[in-house]
Amino acid sequence: MSSPDGSTVSFRRTPPDFRRRNVERFARRLETEVAKGQPFGCLITSDTELRRLNREFRGMDYATDVLSFPAAGPAAYLGDLVISLGRARAQAREFGHPVEEEVEILMLHGLLHLLGYDHETDRGQMARAEKRWRTSLGLATGLIERVQS
């Protein structure tokens, strides 16, 4: 998914009602502001594909909302994110905001994982970073905050 132009967002299928350009601009903003110029790739796909990848790479047989795949070894390219559009739609409805904003929330969360954060082991460091960036980027409540509340 790497591109000489920086971070990329790819879709298996782009729904006609999805504002793709907004999400692509947001990915470039994340690259500049959060990742300090390091590009990453993002694939937006189906629950079926997320379930398969989650089972294959994490041993968990269910669809999840976002998976992060860091690049191997030290490199300028951070790695790849995979986001379930189905999960993003459901979560957007649940939390009352547009699906594009939910994809952006998931993208930020996944990018923090690519940057080495791990909310399961870091004693709140990722939660604080996610909240700080979410506020700075004008996003709704993040994933970690949802689980904690």
Image (cartoon, rainbow, N blue to C red):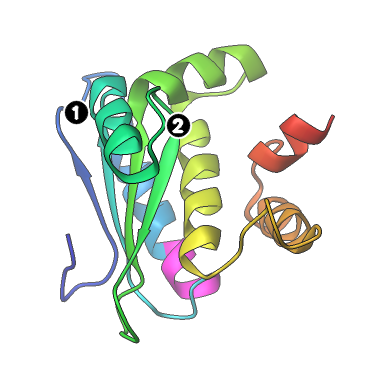
Instruction: Give coordinates of residue 122: x percent, y percent.
Output: 73, 63
**Does the stretch in magenta take in 98?**
no
Q: Which mark is residue 26?
A: none
* Residue bounds of the magenta highlight: 29-34
Answer left or right for 133 relative to 21: right
> In the drawing, does residue 79 fall left or right of residue 2?
right
Residue 144 to residue 17: above or below: below
Left or right placement of residue 17 versus residue 112 in this view: left
61 lies above or below 35: above
Which residue is found at the position 26% from the left and 71% from the top? 6
Q: Residue at x 66, y 48 (%)?
A: 138
Report whether 118 appears left or right of 1. Answer: right
Task: Say whether residue 33 is magenta.
Answer: yes
Q: CA distance from mark 2 to mark 1?
A: 17 Å
Mark 1 falls on what kind of element? Answer: loop
Q: Which residue is mark 1?
A: 14
**Relative height, residue 14 to residue 138 (above, below):** above
Give the residue at x 16% y 69%. 3
Q: Is residue 123 above or below residue 82?
A: below
Q: Earlier in the sequence, mark 2 or mark 1?
A: 1
Q: Position of residue 79 (x, y in %)?
A: 32, 65
> Which quadrant of the figure contains the N terminus?
bottom left
Residue for badge 2: 65
Rendered image quadrant of residue 31:
bottom left
Image quarter for residue 25? Answer: bottom left
The residue positioned 43% from the left and 53% from the top of the image is 26
Local crowd size for mark 1, using a 10 Å CA cut-off: few (<14), some (14–19), many (≥20):
few
